[in-house]
Image (spheres, rainbow, N blue to C red):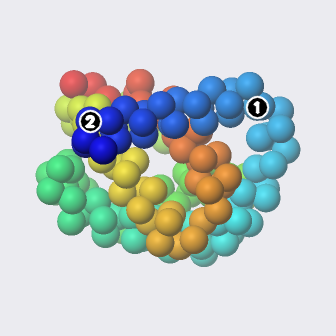
Amino acid sequence: MPFFKIKTLQKTVIAMFTLGATCLAPTLASADASYYHEFGNRAGIHAVITDFLGYVLADNRIKAYFTNANIPVLNASLTNQVCMLEGGPCKFDENMKAIHQNLGVTEAAFNALAEDLQKSMNQHNIPLTAQNDLLSKLAPMKHDIVTK
């Protein structure tokens, strides 16, 4: 299958899950704590994020965006964000638009980051339902992150 068809298929699948998540919002809200547990609670989320950042820093498509980043602080912040999104007890109140406004993030970079996250979640055997739940919550943030 040509590369462009795979990308189109991937975008279609993500759009379907995002639409499904929107239609099932009350169900997802009640299921959040179970997704938190499927990620392995805070320790499991931290492991996923640590490996995710390793993939990002090795990814030639996007590693330049992280040249000046404080990786331990970023790791803690992303761990808290995912923990909160998946129904855990963590707090995350960062303004995504303010954080990314001067970075010039492209749609391609946003998609590469999502691919690296999926790779890490797969490596940690996160169930597909939990992966899709997280991705459906992160996808709407694209409007605040992609600036170029």
Image coordinates for residue 52, horizontal then vertical, percent: 39, 64
Q: Which residue is mark 1?
A: 25
**In this rendering, is residue 11 above or below 58?**
above
Which circle marks residue 4 in the picture? 2
Q: Residues within 10 Å of mark 2 (few under 14, many from 20)?
A: few
Quarter of the picture containing the C terminus is top left
Direction from residue 61 to residue 5 in the image, left or right: right
Image coordinates for residue 111, horizontal then vertical, percent: 34, 41
- In the image, what residue type sits under mark 1? Ala
Element carrying mark 1:
helix
Quarter of the picture containing the N terminus is top left
Mark 1 or mark 2, earlier in chain: 2
Element carrying mark 2:
helix
Q: How many marks?
A: 2
Residue 89, by quadrant, is bottom right
Q: Give the Cα separation between the discs numbered 1 and 2.
A: 31 Å
Q: Residues within 10 Å of mark 1 (few under 14, many from 20)?
A: few
